[in-house]
């Protein structure tokens, strides 16, 4: 949306076309994963890190994508952990929206494994790792839709006392904590969060404990707006119902939708010399109104984290916030699925039924 400084985009125009949560198409994948036979497993490509034949004696199941919107549980063996590594017995795994697109598309001729939000216990340690067996850990490890997975010890954090292990999703919490930590929020700032999905809801809970004087949430879904109020938001709006004066009134805007329209609305709502923090995960090319960004003299934060050490520290800090009751994850995990119902979990995330926030796979 190109504009001159004396003809800034109208938030009403942007709001009218805003489509933060709705899927691009109505997709109806099969409902359930199937358990593949040993013959089917043998006919597939090697299982890689989670199960090279002859690489160890531990048997594991893992989920492989076999077609558009469907997968299968296969079996194999797991290597012993090498130097600096550990073997995780996985109990729970969050379902991330970033994997819905690849799941719906299918493997496209390659082997596709999913899962990077594990919670589990240490089953064995490699040389140089001294974490007691049985310790509950979490962090960014992939792929982890499996009974067992090998992890680099630099990527995991012990779940602290006082945190329920069945909700201790360290990876997504760490992503939000790291992103907000790099987003300048000053005393008495007015903050807007666009998108009240799982990551947005974590951000809302943390922002209400920050220096912000007012936290407004914008989302298409009524149930998401109600949830944001329970998280402590001061005001919630459908994008089509934003009040007069909302345009250019926010000191900081957190974009947590991963959509083009979310970015456009953030551009409209932020004030001159304000901050736009891009927390949403954008999986395709985007167009930004650079003329308006330049005219408004915006500070733009790419609130993603790729450095493993930064993420691990943010996971640790995030779990401490959970332990101190500054962050409630239990109320955000709304749907749980058995290991053999992973396709159901993806389908539910894709469709977002009323009340949906986050899906969890219970493996053990």
Image (spheres, rainbow, N blue to C red):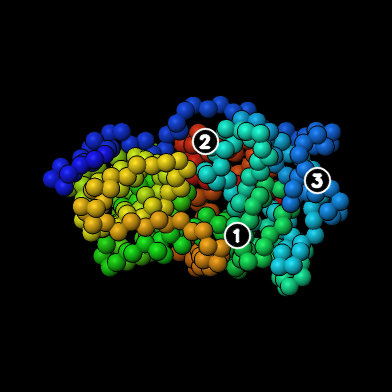
Q: Earlier in the sequence, mark 2 or mark 3?
A: 3
* Image-based side of 302 in relation to 160, left or right: left
Residue annotated with mark 3 = 76
The answer to which image quadrant residue 44 occupies is: top right
Q: Which dot, 3 or 1, sits closer to the camera?
A: 3
Q: Secondary structure at mark 3?
A: strand
Front residue of 17/292: it is 292
Question: Does residue 44 sit above or below 302 in this rendering?
Answer: above
Picture coordinates of residue 84, whole percent (x, y) = 71, 68
* Image-based side of 132 in relation to 156, left or right: right
Residue at left offset 76%, top offset 64%:
82
Residues at discs 3 and 1 in contact (Cβ within 8 Å) = no
Q: Which mark is residue 139?
A: 1
Instruction: Classify mark 1: residues with Cα within 10 Å, few (<14), some (14-19) or many (20+).
Output: many
Tell me how far mark 3 sits from mark 1, CA to CA: 24 Å
The answer to which image quadrant residue 23 occupies is: top left
The answer to whether residue 225 of the structure is visible from this angle is no
Instruction: Classify mark 2: residues with Cα within 10 Å, few (<14), some (14-19) or many (20+).
Output: many
Tell me how far mark 2 sits from mark 3, CA to CA: 29 Å
Picture coordinates of residue 348, whole percent (x, y) = 55, 36
Q: Earlier in the sequence, mark 3 or mark 1?
A: 3
Residues at discs 1 and 2 in contact (Cβ within 8 Å) = no
Residue annotated with mark 2 = 350
Q: Secondary structure at mark 2?
A: helix
Instruction: Classify mark 3: residues with Cα within 10 Å, few (<14), some (14-19) or many (20+).
Output: many
Picture coordinates of residue 37, whole percent (x, y) = 82, 34
């Amino acid at each position: 949306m190109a504009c001159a400084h004396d003809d800034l985009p109208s938030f009403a125009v942007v709001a009218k076309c805003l489509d933060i949560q709705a899927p691009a198409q109505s997709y109806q994948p099969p409902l359930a994963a199937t358990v593949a036979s040993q013959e089917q497993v043998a006919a597939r490509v090697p299982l890689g890190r989670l199960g090279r034949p002859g690489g160890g004696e531990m048997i594991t199941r893992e989920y492989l994508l076999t077609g558009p919107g469907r997968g299968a549980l296969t079996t194999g063996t797991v290597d012993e952990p090498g130097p600096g590594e550990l073997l995780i017995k996985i109990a729970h795994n969050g379902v991330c929206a970033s994997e819905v697109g690849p799941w719906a598309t299918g493997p496209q001729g390659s082997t596709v494994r999913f899962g990077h939000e594990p919670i589990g216990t240490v089953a064995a340690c490699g040389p140089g790792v001294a974490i007691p067996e049985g310790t509950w850990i979490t962090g960014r490890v992939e792929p982890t839709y499996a009974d067992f997975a090998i992890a680099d010890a630099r990527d995991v954090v012990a779940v602290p006392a006082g945190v329920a292990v069945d909700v201790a999703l360290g990876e997504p919490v760490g992503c939000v904590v790291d992103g907000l930590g790099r987003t300048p929020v000053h005393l008495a700032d007015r903050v807007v969060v666009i998108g009240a999905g799982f990551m947005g809801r974590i951000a809302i809970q943390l922002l209400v404990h920050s220096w912000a004087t007012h936290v407004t949430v914008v989302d298409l879904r009524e149930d998401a707006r109600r949830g944001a109020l329970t998280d402590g938001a001061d005001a919630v709006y459908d994008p089509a119902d934003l009040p007069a004066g909302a345009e250019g009134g926010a000191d900081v805007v957190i974009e947590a939708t991963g959509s083009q329209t979310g970015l456009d609305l953030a551009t409209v709502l932020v004030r001159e010399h304000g901050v736009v923090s891009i927390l949403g995960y954008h999986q395709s090319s985007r167009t930004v109104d650079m003329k308006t960004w330049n005219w408004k003299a915006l500070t733009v934060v790419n609130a993603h984290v790729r450095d493993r050490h930064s993420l691990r520290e943010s996971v640790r800090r995030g779990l401490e916030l959970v332990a101190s009751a500054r962050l409630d994850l239990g109320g955000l995990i709304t749907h749980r699925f058995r290991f053999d119902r992973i396709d159901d979990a993806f389908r539910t995330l894709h469709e977002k039924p009323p009340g949906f926030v986050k899906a969890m796979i219970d493996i053990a």
